Image: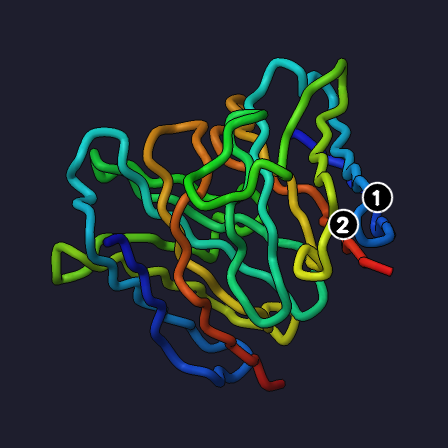
Amino acid sequence: QVTLRESGPALVKSTHTLTLTCTFSGFSLSATGMCVSWIRQPPGKALEWLARIDWEDDKYYNTSLKTRLTISKGTSKNQVVLTMTNMDPVDTATYYCARIWGIGGSFDFWGQGTMVTVSS
Amino acid sequence: SSVLTQPPSVSVAPGQTARITCGGNNIGSKSVHWYQQKPGQAPVVVVYDDSDRPSGIPERFSGSHSGDTATLTISRVEAGDEADYYCQVWDFISDHPVFGGGTKLTVL
């Protein structure tokens, strides 16, 4: 059974750094083709892909946010961590982690999301 | 990078057929995935690779391609189908996924 769960602060101050953790089970990030991505959704708005880490530890970022994002494997082999620097109120959103198995494939499993509010 | 255009809203009566489009340059050459998102919930894939359905998704959900437009078709629409729907493709030039702006399906 594949599950993903996001964790992190619900409230972050403007200019501070956000750190989110995705804890997953039911699959191995070392399996060929396996990837975990972060996706966010501001209230009432569309989904926006942020970053991806794959089975070879390669990392990819949304071009417009690249300078602020870092994705990495956590200290536990079943965790992926996203940091976003210099947070702004426009970054207020629900942040999801999701799995893709195979580049070009769909996000077949998602976490329930974690709402992050950035205060000015 | 790819830009995917969806109508903001589609309305349909129960029992009728809903069609949600996703337009994009050269979308015909890409695999299109569709997600359903109900209020307060994470998205769920309902169609992947243009026209395949994950297990547990009713046959009423189908996907198709024609030219620069992909279409999600929901037959015999039920009240429980009311949700936001997003299309998604993989942009191999920038090497990242792209989502459409979403379509709110209202069941009248």
Which residue is at the front of the view, A58 or B22?
B22
For marks 2 and 1, the one nearer the N-term is 1
Tell me the chain of label 2: B
Q: Quadrant of the C terminus of chain B?
A: bottom right
Circle 1 packing at 10 Å, graded few (<14), some (14-19), many (20+), is: some
Q: Position of residue B66 (x, y in %)?
A: 74, 16
Task: Give residue A82's quadrant in the image.
Answer: bottom left
Q: Which residue shows up at 74% across the image and 21% down it? A: B25
Q: Is residue B99 above or below residue B24?
A: below
Element under disc 1:
loop
Q: Chain of mark 1?
A: B
Q: Which residue, given by chain and number where applicable, does mark 2 sit on?
A: B103
| Snapshot quadrant of residue A29 | top left
- Mark identifier at residue B7: 1
Q: Is residue B57 above or below residue B43?
A: above
| Residue closer to the observer: B30 or A50 | B30
Q: Quadrant of the N terminus of chain B?
A: top right
Q: Residue at x 27, y 53 (%)?
A: A2
Q: CB of mark 2 within 8 Å of CB of mark 1?
A: yes
Give the Cα separation between the discs numbered 2 and 1: 6 Å
Can residue B89 be seen here? yes
Q: On the picture, is A83 further left or further right than A116? A: left
* Mark 1: amino acid: Pro
Q: Residue furthest left?
A: A76
Q: How many marks?
A: 2
* Position in image of residue A100 (x %, y %): 37, 40
Tell me the element at label 2. strand
Q: Position of residue B43 (x, y in %)?
A: 54, 55
Amino acid residing under circle 2: Thr
